[in-house]
Amino acid sequence: MEILQGKSVFGGIAIGKICVYQKEEQQVKRSKVDDVDKEIQRFREAKDLAITQLGQLYDKAVKEVGESSAAIFEIHQMMLEDLDYVESIENIIKTQSVNAEFAVAETSDNFQMIFASMDDEYMRGRAADVKDVSERLLTILHGNHKDALHTAEPVIIAADDLAPSETVQLDKEKVLAFVTIHGSTNSHTAILAKTMNIPALIGVDIDLKAVDGKMAVVDGYEGRIYIEPDEGVLAEKQAKLQEDIEKRNLLQTLKGRENVTLDGQKIMLYANIGDIKDLGMVMQNDAGGIGLFRSEFIYLDKETFPTEEEQFKVYKTVAETMAGKRVIIRTLDIGADKQADYFNLGKEDNPAMGYRAIRICLTQPEIFKTQLRAIFRASAYGKIAIMYPMITSVEEVLKIKEIVAEVKEELTFQKIAFGEVEQGIMIETPAAVMISDLLAKEVDFFSIGTNDLTQYTLAIDRQNDKLDDFYNPHHKAVLRMIAKVVENSHKEGIWTGICGELGADPELTKLFLAMGVDELSVSPGRILGLRKIILETNMENCREEILAQYL
Ligand code: PEP
Ligand code: MG
């Protein structure tokens, strides 16, 4: 048995086999080959296997997300059959007597460059597809035939690090836990683990070459992984897992209850989601609504811009499923750690403070309008609200309002139905906090994004794992900001929620109640635990004391 210590992102116990997830970024070396025919044959076999894999992916995607979203895998299959692409690879192998990997990488670079420089937007988007199919070929040529994203049995995923775009593609039913060597506790990958309600460890010094397929226990409470656990440990952890299941079942008895303290203070408990697949957890945990739908995951899960129709279907499904409960869709918050190749965002020195979120939407209004049209159309099917990320000024809000007015006008002109849609903003920059009195006059609600607010206030890059020890989630600077925002919103008669991870911190629930926070939006699995705390709390005569203690 080997025991490794890491940092825990989310508690819980997982018992199962380890599956090592290899990055698709491939190092390609140019090497000479003697037998070019054999090399061409190697390439052709890899191509056939890639086409088969894509066919399987297509079938899976049709079932999970529908035909239109699955079509991308068919396009990739066609690309692999494309004569220009295939001939280029075979020609490089033949004329330069080089390995197939090099020929694929060279062709991929050339084709990407050609597509990227085309005038037509659709063709430019194909550059990302060439990259994707070529990487699949390289994975196969490198002898890594296993597609770790699609394992047959539920597994513990071990990886060097995981990007949000990789995590989002994992089949959630098949993932018992995450264990990574790198990554920060505040990253989006960590947040996804919480939404999935599974244990996750980061900073684990695990030998990825040695652990694939081995049995292990992940203990998210201790932050440890036990590889090939002995019988004693296994029995102990199985008992703990059983205890967890019983506790969870007990919390289920709180379903249907109001979130109200013993002295009558009410608070809304909503769920954060990134995918329609999270809706099951939302129902199971009795969320009062959806307080944060991270819509950018629709974009991350794709190879090119999702169409209005595709987005509309997703938002409509969420609105209908929530059956009249409020669904707050956060508009595209792409950039920083959430990258999709087809946005061509380019490298930046400070991506967290760079070209991201609302800044992209305001400078590329066609992308923004497509999303807004989809959201407004879906609002005819439920109670949808919109909120905008990374706001720093009143001018941005006014500009957004102008664009929203145009979208509504167009829809009205086209006789397309839409409902009443509340407009809110995320308060996640210190600038927004400082002018929250002014912003409150322009919108219907605030939702405080404590993940970014903490990053910008404490100057701690949430992606940087070296800074985890400097990160104090209870820093007075952040807590005072929250209090200020709540106060300013109430003065203007609007409500404030918290949708960052701090909202789920059970140590702070009383403080948030004392501040008068109106809503907490948390990972679905945290809702009933918070409800229990609220139901057992009496805020009478202790408000001032609690505020003084934390602020
Ligand atoms: C936040 O910043 O707190 C937030 C909820 O948004 P995200 O974590 O997606 O940046
Ligand atoms: Mg944020």
Image (spheres, rainbow, N blue to C red):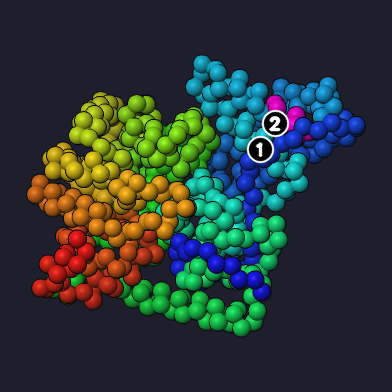
Task: Name the residue rendered at 70%, 27% in the picture.
Answer: 106
Task: Name the residue rendered at 64%, 24% in the picture.
Answer: 111
| Residue 363 point in image, percent of width and height | 34, 26
Q: Tell whether 380 sits left or right of 118.
A: left
Q: Please report the bounds of the magenta region as a residue range.
A: 99-107
| 3D distance between C-alphas at marks 1 and 2 | 8 Å
Q: Is residue 511 magenta?
A: no
As helix, strand or loop, the secondary structure at mark 1 comes to: helix
Q: Main secondary structure of the magenta part?
A: helix
**Which residue in the structure is indicated by mark 1?**
135
Task: Name the residue rendered at 66%, 59% in the picture.
Answer: 207
Q: Tell whether 248 sits left or right of 450.
A: right
- Looking at this view, is 398 or 392 the one in front? 392
Which amino acid type is marked by label 2? Ala
Dot 2 beta carbon under 8 Å from ligand 1: no
| Residue 294 point in image, percent of width and height | 38, 47
User: Which numbered marker is on residue 329?
Assistant: none
**Which residue in the structure is indicated by mark 2?**
105
Q: Residue furthest top?
A: 119
Which amino acid type is marked by label 1? Glu
Q: Residue furthest right?
A: 34
Q: What crowding class fits label 1: few (fewer than 14 Cα within 10 Å), some (14-19), or many (20 or more)?
A: some
| Residue 116 point in image, percent of width and height | 55, 22
Quarter in which the N terminus is drawn: bottom right
